[in-house]
Amino acid sequence: MLRSIAGLIKPTGGTIRIGGVPVTRTPDNLAVVFQDYSRSLFPWMSVADNVALPLRRRGMNAKQRRQAAAEALEQVGLAGAEGKYPWELSGGMQQRASIARALAYRPSLMLMDEPFGSVDAQTREDLEDLVLRVRGTHNMTILLITHDIDESVYVGDRVVVLSKAPATVVKELRVDLPAPREQIATREHPAFVHLRAEVGRLVRGRVNEAAGTR
């Protein structure tokens, strides 16, 4: 699905539109954050150069690219790491750098493909909170793919549960939780508990249905 939205492959049916415009190629206003951060950053380039790389498409000169990269790195908590190389960073820091690269591009749509699936639990929570801050300070839509039920409710405004392939929408749920969201307080809130249970039932029903067709 993400590859179709990004214009990398054609959908087998229907039309994908962003802002009402059909997607026929990779949109200029789109950025992607991948799950495998170790392969999405170039190891021979500094963190700042990795973040600034796509800005050439924006027509920025070298000074503008450096400034935009520095601002994005500061937003994700990596100020001072501009001169380091990806292999000198922890996994969580590498993923922060990947998010900074997307932010520096200033997209209107950010696609996140299970971005926290390869980090430890504490780092995952930190990165979830980073996504919430990004959502609160940038005028963009974020489409985040996850298999983690708690995460979908915690970071989302809407949760869309998909069936097994060929994917169809099982149900779309709106998330209405008190702001600001906080890892412990939000997860203990009755609305969170209710939504998490509902999403869980939908996912389990989808899995059981798939198992019954084997």
Image: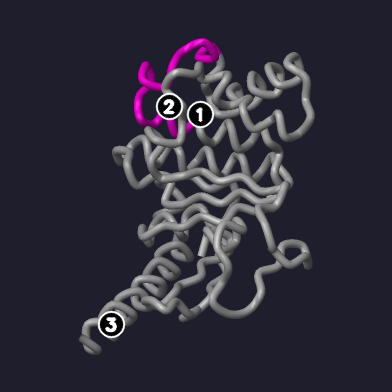
- Report the residue that reaches farthest toward the bottom: 213
Q: Is residue 91 magenta?
A: yes
Mark 1 sits on what residue? 97
Q: Secondary structure at mark 3?
A: helix
Amino acid type of the residue that numbered disc 3 sits on in the rendered structure = Ala
Label 3 belongs to which residue?
A: 210
The image shows residue 150, relative to residue 61, as above or below, that is below
Dot 1 and dot 3 residues touching (CB under 8 Å): no
- 206, 202: nearer the viewer: 206
Element assignment for label 1: helix
**Distance in Å between CA atoms under marks 2 and 3:** 37 Å
* In front of the other: 150 or 21: 21
The residue indicated by pointer 2 is: 93
Q: How is the image coloured?
A: one colour
For the magenta stretch, what is the residue range? 80-96
- Which kind of residue does numbered mark 1 sit on? Ala
Q: What residue appears at the point 44 percent right and 48 percent down from the top-left corner?
A: 185
**Quadrant assignment for the C terminus:** bottom left
At x 72%, y 47%, the residue is: 28
> Where in the figure is residue 163, as x and y percent of width and height?
40, 78
- The numbered mark at residue 137 is none
**Rendering coords of residue 30 (x, y %):** 66, 48
| Marks 1 and 3, how far apart at CA | 38 Å
Cβ–Cβ under 8 Å for marks 1 and 2 = yes
Snapshot quadrant of residue 151: bottom left
Which picture quadrant has residue 204? bottom left
Residue drawn where x is 51% and y is 34% of the image: 98
Q: In the drawing, does residue 124 fall left or right of residue 177?
A: left
Q: CA distance from mark 1 to mark 2?
A: 6 Å
Looking at marks 2 and 3 on the same chain, the residue that comes earlier in the sequence is marked by: 2
Residue 113 falls inside the magenta stretch: no
Q: Is residue 204 above or below residue 104?
A: below
